[in-house]
Image: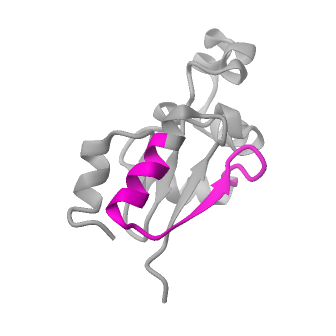
Amino acid sequence: MSNEVLVLSYSGCSTCKKALKWLEAQGVPHRVRPIVDSPPTVAELAQWIPRSGVSVRKWLNTSGQSYRALGKPKVDAASDAELHTWLAADGKLVKRPVLVTPTVVLVGFQPESWARVFPSGG
């Protein structure tokens, strides 16, 4: 069984590039899934959001064009189920990168948080 982790990433995202460089430096085996081409599915989100320990609203890329196109009032009025559907339909709406391990899911890149998951590298 592989101890490889999954990273949902966007190639044009500087934060994603930093996160991938960090994983490389730590020697953490990982597989990259392009988040725009293959966004998380509704089923994946149903598993991953609880494992992330943050609400579905923290999964939104609030600085992106997709979020701005929807508009804050529409997002604020949306149910969690609607947000799941929107996140699954548009990878650019998802805050990135998303790190998926067998036990933990992290959204966004904070080196301190990632270091707690991989205290001595991969």
- Residue 65 vertical position relative to residue 91 in the rendered view, above or below: above
Q: Is 117 in front, or is 15?
A: 15
- Residue 86 vertical position relative to residue 77 in the rendered view, above or below: below
Using the rendered view, name the quadrant where residue 18 is placed: top left
Q: Going 64% across and 21% down the picture, which residue do you hit?
A: 64
Q: Going 43% across and 66% down the picture, which residue do you hit?
A: 101
Percent from the top left, x then y, of residue 76? 57, 17
Q: Which residues are magenta?
A: 18-41
In-image side of 69 versus 47 (left or right)? right
Percent from the top left, x then y, of residue 121? 28, 66
Q: Is residue 82 visible?
A: no
Q: Is 45 in front, or is 30?
A: 30
Q: Is residue 93 visible?
A: yes
- Residue 5 vertical position relative to residue 80 in the rendered view, above or below: below
Q: Going 44% across and 38% down the picture, which residue do you hit?
A: 55
In-image side of 91 versus 72 (left or right)? right
In-image side of 81 versus 16 (left or right)? right
Using the rendered view, name the quadrant where residue 86 is placed: top right
Q: Quadrant of the C terminus?
A: bottom left
Q: Going 52% across and 60% down the picture, which residue do you hit?
A: 47
Q: Is 85 in front, or is 89?
A: 89
Using the rendered view, name the quadrant where residue 66 is placed: top right
Q: How many marks?
A: 0
